[in-house]
Image (spheres, rainbow, N blue to C red):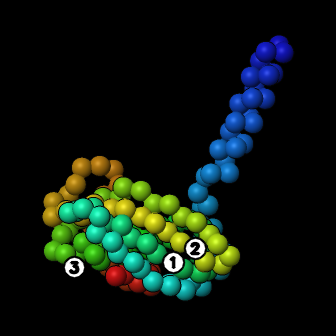
Amino acid sequence: MRVATAVAAGWMAATAGLSACAPVPVDESAPFAPTYKGIETILLDGDLVNFRVAMTGARGDGDVDAYARCAAAQYALIRGFGFARHVRTTVAKTGEIWRGDAVYTISAALPRGLKTIDAEVTVRDCGAQGIPTV
């Protein structure tokens, strides 16, 4: 019995530490008055692009992620591509400023993977939501 208790206590301590790393979900009921501070686009290699965004008034990581996704979709269209695939996004908050650092691949054809976006549809959705693009 003591072994099981010790294992359970160790597991709870380990998972408690991991929960601190979990993304902050968007609270849809919170008032939302964002100020979009800008987008920096960095071509990393051919079809691999880094987007750095900054904003205030985010409700959580999801709002920052949406801003970066909108930037990636518009960038894909500007470059003559119709699709993008999400590689990774990191979000950090310093004071009131939320910063996102996202990497996407852009392509003419629908890329393989689960986190793909149709650039034209996404840009249209971003406009309807008032999220600026590149």
Residue 88, by quadrant, is bottom left
Residue 134 appears in view: yes
At a point 39% along the width and 78% down the height, the residue shown is: 40
Q: Which of 52 and 124 is in front in this view?
A: 52
Q: Would you name the residue on which mark 1 appears?
A: 54
Q: Where is residue 34 in the image (x, y as percent from the top left)?
A: 56, 83
Residue 67, by quadrant, is bottom left
Q: Where is residue 43 in the image (x, y as percent from the top left)?
A: 28, 69
Contact check, label 3 and label 1, Cβ < 8 Å? no
Earlier sequence position, callout 2 versus callout 1: 1
Earlier sequence position, callout 2 versus callout 3: 3
Q: Would you name the residue on which mark 2 appears?
A: 98
Amino acid residing under circle 3? Ile
Secondary structure of the residue carrying tag 3 is: helix
Q: Position of residue 47 (x, y in %)?
A: 22, 62
Secondary structure of the residue carrying tag 1 is: strand
Amino acid residing under circle 1? Ala
Earlier sequence position, callout 3 versus callout 1: 1
Amino acid residing under circle 2? Trp
Q: Nearer the viewer, mark 3 or mark 1?
A: 1
At a point 66% along the width and 78% down the height, the residue shown is: 96
Q: In this view, does 44 lie above or below 80?
A: above
Gap in Å between the C-alphas at discs 3 and 1? 21 Å
Name the image quarter holding the C terminus: bottom left
Q: Is residue 15 above or below residue 44?
A: above
Secondary structure of the residue carrying tag 2 is: strand
Q: In this view, does 96 lie above or below 16?
A: below
User: Callout 3: 10 Å neighbours few (<14), some, many (20+)?
Assistant: few
Q: In this view, does 116 lie above or below 12?
A: below
Gap in Å between the C-alphas at discs 2 and 1? 6 Å
Q: Would you name the residue on which mark 3 appears?
A: 78
